Amino acid sequence: MRRLVLEFDVNKVAELKQGPKLDNIESMETITFLRSTPEEVALIFRIKLKDPTMKLDEALGGDFDELQVLEKSGDRFICYFRKRRFVIDKGKDLLGSGVYLSPPYEIRDGRLRATFLANAKEIRTILAGLSESGMPYRIISLMDAKFLPDSPLSQLTERQRRVIVSAFKLGYYDVPRRVSSEELARQLDIKEPTLVMHRRKAERRLLSSVLGQI
């Protein structure tokens, strides 16, 4: 899995046909992503608006499933935000299957910095989609995604990590399940028996890591 960090001009992003009106934001810092899939993005973040009297939903715009203020301190908010689609101009999906947003995802001094986790092919698709849309961007960094040595994910192969992370993100482990094994395999463009094999090996390694500490 690769880690791609891009930087955008907030004013250019604000011209998107869909999505938050980022030009109303003075600064934003993502604390964590709760979910990141082609269908929805959910995150907790700190935000400061240019106009502190403006309501948060008015400032951000967009089509929200839910937008809730968890805490407010002066003109700063800590919010829970969920949105169905993350798209670029011309309606092209930027988050394809297997592509995830990750911190740092922030706004500072009129610049949006976004981090994507994806394989090499998916990263090429992201960059091609941005180029086709005419959205200017700057690559800050592109490197292998690193996991801490004591992280259970560090014990998995890249394919196992991709399968298990995608299964979790897309709702395979939700109750009830939001995606079937067959649909998950189709989204990852692999055969279902191959997906099941990698998923089971990943599950066994993760369980061994956790239960071995009991």
Image (cartoon, rainbow, N blue to C red):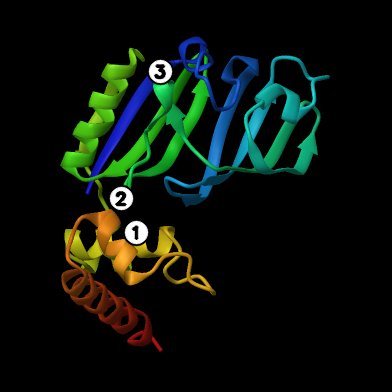
Q: Are marks 2 and 1 in contact (CB under 8 Å)?
A: yes
Query: Relative to 153, does residue 18 appear above or below in the rendering?
Result: above
Disc 1 crowd rating (10 Å Cα; few below 14, some 14-19, many 20+) is: many
Query: Relative to 62, does residue 144 appear above or below in the rendering?
Result: below
Which circle marks residue 10 in the picture?
Answer: none
Which circle marks residue 166 in the picture?
Answer: 1
Residue 21: % across, % down: 60, 20
Residue 121: % across, % down: 17, 40
In which quarter of the view is residue 38 placed?
top left
Q: Earlier in the sequence, mark 2 or mark 3?
A: 3
The amino acid marked with disc number 3 is: Phe
In which quarter of the view is residue 139 placed?
top left
| Distance in Å between CA atoms under marks 2 and 1 | 6 Å
Q: Secondary structure at mark 3?
A: strand
Q: Which residue is mark 3?
A: 8
The amino acid marked with disc number 2 is: Gly
Which circle marks residue 98 in the picture?
Answer: 2
